[in-house]
Image (spheres, grey):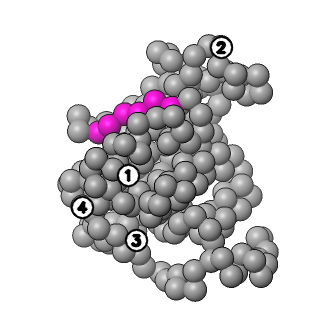
Amino acid sequence: MVTTNTFSEKQSSEAKTDSIAFDPSTTAVLVVDMLKDFFSDGGAMVLDGGDLLYEPHRELLSAARDKGMPVFWLNQDLPPDDSLFQTRAVHCLSGTWGAEIVDEIPVDASDIIISKRRYSGFFQTTLDLNLRERGIDTVIVTGVVTNICVRSTVHDAFFLSYKVLVPEDLVMATSNQAQEVTLYDIETHYGDVTNLKQVMTVLGEE
């Protein structure tokens, strides 16, 4: 259970509702690290139950593409000597099987793939430029893990003045507690936590 305090209550919006609104013509989907090292048998850091994210992603991405929304895949892609491996297990090495997008979620020819070396999809990448060139002001952030790379990407999107939506059933954290705490922080300070049904309603799929 996450306890609130006066600071968080004042910082959060008083207008939160059970519905959301966004313009598909100015919205993009950012899919974070849906990679084999995190999901597939033999992967370096496989999430327990990660396969539960496959079907919601297939539904969302299909509907988004039908509306002409750009889909960005933000993929961890690391050299063998990356300093990250001083504290983390080796994973998502450039050019290896583990750094590939999972087979269970189709990638469309119109999708944009952006490699990243740090947690955030914005840090020292072309993501912000690509979004602004397309007139995007809202991002739907999905993928893994909620408390690390998803959170970092959400933070940077907010800092860059994008409206941020995070469907809670399209993200997964390293633990249930981490999921709850991170989504609470996002909801109260960085964006709106929603779900697939609400997003699909806006897209006319519900």
Corner quadrant of residue 43: top right
Marking on residue 68: none
* Neighbour tally class for label 2: few under 14, some 14-19, many 20 plus, Cα within 10 Å: few
Estimate the spatial distance between the alpha carbons at disc 1 and disc 2, rounded to whole Å.
Answer: 31 Å
Q: Nearer the viewer, mark 2 or mark 3?
A: 2
Tell me the residue that label 4 is attached to. 25
Disc with the residue nearer the chain's start (1 vs 2)? 1
Mark 2 lies on a secondary structure that is loop
**Residue 41 locus on image (x, y percent):** 56, 27
Tell me the residue that label 2 is attached to. 81
Marking on residue 198: 3
Taking the spot 62% from the left edge, 24% from the top edge, the residue there is: 91
**Residue 90 locus on image (x, y percent):** 67, 21
Q: Nearer the viewer, mark 1 or mark 2?
A: 2
Marking on residue 29: 1
Q: Which residues are magenta?
A: 111-116
Side of 104 where 178 appears, left or right: right
